Image (cartoon, coloured by chain):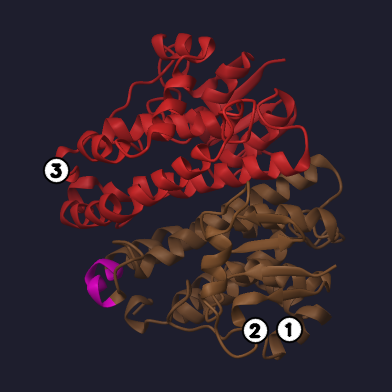
Chain colours: A brown, B red
Amino acid sequence: MTYALYYWPTIQGRGEFVRLALEEAGVACEDVARGRDGPDFRAISAVLDGDTAYPPFAPPVLRDGERVIAQTANVLLYLGARHGLAPDDEVGRLWTNQLQLTLADWVDEIHDTHHPLGASLYYDEQKPEAARRSRVFLDQRLPKFMRYFERLLASRPGDEPWLAGGAITYADLSLFQVVDGLRYAFPRAMARVEAGCPGVVALHDRVRARPRIAAYLASGRRVPFNEDGIFRRYPELDLQ
Amino acid sequence: MTYALYYWPTIQGRGEFVRLALEEAGVACEDVARGRDGPDFRAISAVLDGDTAYPPFAPPVLRDGERVIAQTANVLLYLGARHGLAPDDEVGRLWTNQLQLTLADWVDEIHDTHHPLGASLYYDEQKPEAARRSRVFLDQRLPKFMRYFERLLASRPGDEPWLAGGAITYADLSLFQVVDGLRYAFPRAMARVEAGCPGVVALHDRVRARPRIAAYLASGRRVPFNEDGIFRRYPELDLQ
């Protein structure tokens, strides 16, 4: 089986949550818009405007044969059930989906730290507003989200170190990605909040040490963090 | 069977998507925080801080016996499968979920028109920023979302008038709610964009005419729109 992923080729963005799941599952996927000869943005327009009964609104989009599936959490719901990255039972599947949606809310707020007035304006057009929004985010929201996941992990018995119990799920991969991105974007704020969240830090370490994830992170397939994605290092927005 | 819903009692907010699904399904649900003697905000804190293996991050939260389920789209995934508000097959279920997640993204952007700098600040603390963000939203994002749903509906055969085909789903109820809220918040902008979206307008009409929905809208159970919720009528933010 070979999937095709359609996502912006020059950033990690929301597509990275799908890429991590595919890497951990060890399944083949063509990252179409990354192209053999460089970025191919037209491939994304083609899938958005394509002739299907289920047209996506925005990338990431996963194609599995004739099926076209969009919305990050929805793609992960699909992949998780097929590749052992979600529990088999309904309770566990819904819980994993719930966690992913909470992580998606967090990611939206992270994006808005540098784009509070809208994604179609440049950062340079909203710098004072981004500074105000980031202050609120770092003071209130970042600790709230981190402590929520810390509380979840602290309540797990020792033989169930993952967010949904004894086995890794796509929600663990996604929490890894959010922590990784936040360390890139807000190193000072993260150093402060991580001191009180040893469970989240340990989960990040455990995901990073997964053989397939470690190989992926060391490979050229992982797009480096940069200032076009969701997680951007603008030192002026970090804790001073 | 009686569900319990935990959501802010004085606004429609994200809880309204769950309330509409429960009303259309005709299933009993205690709207706990609305209380018999007035708003009971402590009921929400209690469920967020409660002792469960699956603690929610934020309302809305649905309780079904021992089960505690959160995140709007996740609650609807659960209710849709149980009460005939989603297709039976996996393709249809994922498509309905995908639509709901796209609607959720739209709702986030609508919220941010009046709160671009963060939900913890008052509107009065971010009025110029809200004006800028609203301009971008009304010029670019509102038409983009409306035309997306118009395109979906226009491509359906006559005997499949709903977003997922021949039968109503929770995504239809949610699109109704977003259109209804936008008409309240941005009457001038909506009048302009609706002129080019007859399919969306017709879907809104069809949902409003469903007997249980019509009864709900005419009842005291529907919290009126107000300036504490997601959809707020601030005339200075509407099209001038």
Sequence-wise, the earlier of marks 2 and 1 is 1
Residue shown at the point (53%, 11%) measured from the top left? B212
Instruction: From the top left corner, tell me how far across and down residue A40 is, in percent.
Output: 55, 80
Could you confirm whether marks 2 and 3 are on the same chain?
no
Tag 3, which secondary structure?
helix
* Contact? badges 2 and 1 (CB < 8 Å): yes
Q: Report the Cα–Cα distance between label 3 and label 1.
A: 50 Å
Q: Which residue is outermost to the front? A: B158
Quadrant of the frame with the C terminus of chain A: bottom left
The magenta region covers A124-131
Q: Report the Cα–Cα distance between label 2 and label 1.
A: 6 Å
Residue denoted by label 3: B236
Q: Residue B77 falls in which quadrant of the image?
A: top right
* Crowd rating for badge 2 (residues with CA inside 10 Å; few <14, some 14–19, many 20+): some
* Left or right: B34 in relation to B116: right
* Left or right: B184 in relation to A58: left
* Left or right: B57 in relation to B118: right
Does the magenta run of residues contain B162? no
Checking the image for residue A222, the label placed there is 2
Instruction: From the top left corner, tell me how far across and down residue B125 is, in percent.
Output: 19, 52
Question: What chain is tagged by disc 3?
Answer: B
Checking the image for residue A216, the label placed there is 1
Q: Report the Cα–Cα distance between label 2 and label 3.
A: 45 Å
* Crowd rating for badge 1 (residues with CA inside 10 Å; few <14, some 14–19, many 20+): some
Instruction: From the top left corner, tell me how far across and down residue B200 is, in percent.
Output: 43, 33
Q: Which amino acid type corresponds to the residue marked 1 in the rendered image?
A: Tyr
